Amino acid sequence: MKSLFLIRHAKSSWADATLKDFDRPLNDRGHRNAKEMAERLKKRALTFDKILSSPAIRAKTTAIYFAEILEIEAIKVEFIASIYESYEDNIIQLVCNTSNSINQLGIFGHNPTFTMLANMFIETPILNVPTCGVVALQFDTNDWSNFFEAPKKLLFFDYPKNK
C-alpha cells in the first residue's frame, strides 16, 4: 500500500504588492493553519517518508511546518522547481518516479493543479482544495510506477475550516 498526501500551501499574504508571486510569504492565518493542519496529521499518527514541495515561499514554509511538527528529518524534504506552476501530469510523473522504499509521500503545491489532480483519483469531486487543505489517498500497490492504475481510495479530505 502507498499513501499520497496532496497539501495545498497555507494562506499567503498579498500585503506587499512588489513581491513576485513566487516570493509571497504566508500571512498570519497561513502560519496558524499550517501548524494546525500538521498537528491534525500528528493526532492521526500520520507522517511522511518523503516530502516534495514547490520552492515558492508559501509552499516551502508550509512544508517546513509539517516537517517540524511531524518530526521529519530535513534530508527527507526536497524542493522541486517543477512543482511550482505545474500541471497534473508533471506531479503524476514525480509520483511515478518515487522510490518504492517510500510508502507515505507528501507533496506541497498549488491550485488549480492540486484540485484537478485530487479529482482524478476520487469519485465525488472536490470543488476546491482550500489553502492548507490535505487530500489523503491510498493506493493498493507496492510500486509507485503503478499508482495511477492501482485501486485507490480517499482516506480523508481535511482543511482548516473543517472543524
Image: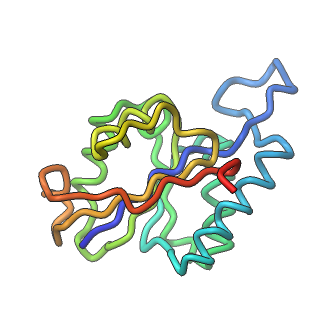
**Residue 72, image x, y percentages:** 56, 76
Q: Quadrant of residue 29?
A: top right
Q: Quadrant of the N terminus?
A: bottom left
Dividing the picture into quarters, in which one does residue 87 lie?
top left
- 110 left or right of 123 in image: right
Here the colouring is: rainbow
What residue do we see at 12% from left, 51% from top?
149
Quadrant into which the C terminus falls: bottom right
Task: Say left or right for 65 vs 109.
Answer: right
Residue at 68% across / 70% down in the picture? Answer: 39
Viewer-proximal residue, 54 or 27? 27
Q: Position of residue 100 (x, y in %)?
A: 23, 71
Q: How many marks?
A: 0
Task: Report the front residue among 32 and 68.
Answer: 32
- Looking at the image, which residue is at 73% across and 62% down? 36
Q: Where in the figure is residue 86, as x and y percent of width and height?
A: 41, 32
98 relative to 161, above or below: below
Q: Residue at x 72, y 40 (%)?
A: 11
Image side of residue 118 versus residue 33, left or right? left
Residue 48: x percent and y percent?
Answer: 46, 71
Residue 143 lies, with reference to residue 57, above or below; the image says below
